[in-house]
Image (spheres, rainbow, N blue to C red):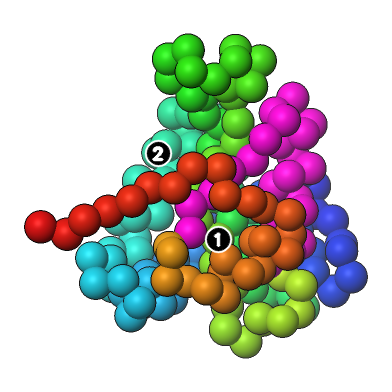
């Protein structure tokens, strides 16, 4: 994907020089999730998690997209291409894109950054021949769930948990 302009939001693939901004945004995401879910790591895990996600992108195929506002990184989204195991899903429907992380800087929220990232990921997945894109969202993250539902995402499966 070349840099493109969707209103004031410019989208492109991540570059090595984006790393500090990606770590900062991943840290903000970690802090937010740690505040609403007790098992989540804080910002100190951001760099390690980003490295792990990038290694999964290299292994499985996928992309880290970056959104800019006025030339500054304002958000990112990472996704991979995956395939459902086994035979419980029809073969032609097994391959899908999976969004791992999406983070928008606090000061950029409400300006269409997240929606532009979702739209770009969906467009790239379609171009790659994938007919479905999935994501995980914490059940307690009602704001994110609402945003995803407004973007057309629906529950596919429900992962349930019981703390022991």
Badge 1 marks a residue whose secondary structure is strand
Q: Is residue 103 above or below residue 65?
A: below
Question: How far, Cα to Cα, is label 1 from label 2?
Answer: 17 Å
> What residue is rendered at 17% in x and 59% in y?
163
Pointer 1 local density, CA inside 10 Å: few below 14, some 14–19, many at least 20 = many
Q: Is residue 35 above or below residue 26?
A: below
Q: Is residue 76 above or below residue 14?
A: below
Q: Is residue 100 visible?
A: yes
- In the image, taking residue 39 as reference, residue 29 lies left or right, namely right
> What residue is rendered at 67% in x and 81% in y?
108
Please provide percent x and percent y for residue 131: 72, 30
Please provide percent x and percent y for residue 117: 70, 58
Query: Which numbered mark, 1 or 2, is in the foreground of this view?
Result: 1
Badge 2 marks a residue whose secondary structure is helix
Return the residue found at the far bottom: 107
Verify whether residue 119 appears in magenta. Answer: yes
Q: Is residue 114 above or below residue 118?
A: below
Please provide percent x and percent y for residue 145: 57, 66
Verify whether residue 80 appears in magenta. Answer: no
Q: Which residue is mark 1?
A: 102
Q: Which residue is mark 2?
A: 55
- In the image, taking residue 25 as reference, residue 162 lies left or right, namely left
Pointer 2 local density, CA inside 10 Å: few below 14, some 14–19, many at least 20 = few
- Residue range (magenta): 114-137
Q: Quadrant of the C terminus?
A: bottom left
Return the residue found at the far left: 164
Of residue 164 and residue 120, the one placed in the foreground of this image is: 164
> What residue is rendered at 65% in x and 61% in y?
148
Please provide percent x and percent y for residue 143: 57, 75
Q: Earlier in the sequence, mark 1 or mark 2?
A: 2
């Amino acid at each position: 994907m070349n840099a493109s302009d969707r209103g004031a939001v410019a989208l492109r693939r991540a570059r090595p020089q984006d790393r500090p901004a990606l770590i900062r945004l991943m840290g903000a995401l970690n802090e937010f999730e740690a505040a609403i879910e007790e098992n989540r790591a804080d910002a100190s895990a951001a760099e390690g998690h980003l490295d792990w996600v990038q290694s999964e992108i290299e292994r499985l195929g996928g992309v880290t997209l970056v959104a800019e506002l006025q030339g500054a990184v304002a958000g990112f989204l990472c996704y991979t291409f995956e395939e459902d195991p086994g035979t419980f899903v029809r073969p032609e429907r097994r391959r899908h894109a999976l969004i791992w992380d999406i983070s928008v800087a606090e000061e950029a929220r409400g300006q269409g950054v997240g929606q532009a990232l979702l739209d770009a990921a969906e467009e790239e997945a379609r171009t790659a021949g994938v007919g479905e894109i999935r994501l995980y969202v914490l059940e307690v993250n009602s704001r994110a769930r609402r945003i995803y539902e407004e973007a057309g995402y629906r529950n596919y499966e429900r992962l349930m948990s019981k703390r022991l």
